[in-house]
Image (tube, helix red, strand yellow):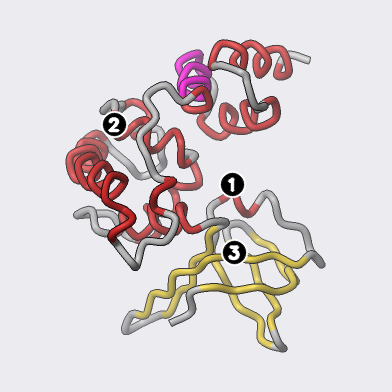
Amino acid sequence: MIGYLSGEVIYLEAPTVIILSHGVGYEVDVPLSTFCQFKKGETVKLWTHFVVREDAQHLYGFSDMQEKFLFRTLLKVNGVGAKMALGILSTLSVELLIHSIEHEDIQSLVKVPGVGKKTAERLVIELRDRLKQLAKNGSSHNNLPQIERLQFLPDSPVAEAEAALMSLGYKPAEAQKAVAMVKADGLDSAGLIKAALKNMVK
């Protein structure tokens, strides 16, 4: 089992990155939000999930343990495979995904490529209680490090700002990028929305 990987980026072709570590090149599929942060020649660190099947072996990488945990949790949902789980994390930020699940925001979920209304409803039903329970009792699960960080934030300024921009017609990736560029401590959702819109129309 490969659970963590550190090395030099030697190849990039979304969503795949090849990382050279101790003379071995590891081919890793990562969420697009992570992929866009990488540059050839730089040293990166990834938390990984290794999938072995009869016909293939795949390594998936994530920027932090929370993202890795959400990926593994998504795989437990009926009808969700690794490709769809990666697509969900590529389209929705961790904050927006959790916000969408808690508030049963089907419209945000169906914007993920490959996710229809029935799948979105299944995600809400199967993940809502599971995430809440794990967030509440995460410290008792030895195999879920840092799970105390996973919590529902109905008033999360980042999630609310992203959701507001999406309601205005911006694509999820555009909304996430715009909010990330202006995110700062102390700004409420209204401040983030205003700053993001101002930055987008420059």
Q: Residue 181 at what x, y percent from top left?
A: 70, 30
Q: Which residues are magenta?
A: 160-169
Q: In this rendered view, identify the residue nearer to me: 157 or 202.
A: 157
Q: Which residue is mark 3?
A: 16
Which numbered disc flags the more N-terminal residue, 1 or 3?
3
Q: Residue 173 at what x, y percent from top left?
A: 56, 34
Q: In this rendered view, identify the residue nearer to me: 142 or 78.
A: 142
Q: Residue 71 at what x, y percent from top left?
A: 39, 56
Per the rendering, the mark at residue 124 is none
Type of amino acid at the residue the image marks with label 2: Glu
The answer to which image quadrant residue 151 occupies is: top left
Label 3: element kind: strand
- Image point 39% across, 53% down: which residue? 147
The answer to which image quadrant residue 116 occupies is: top left
- Image point 62% across, 13% down: which residue? 191
Residue 44 in view of the camera? yes
Q: Which residue is mark 2?
A: 102
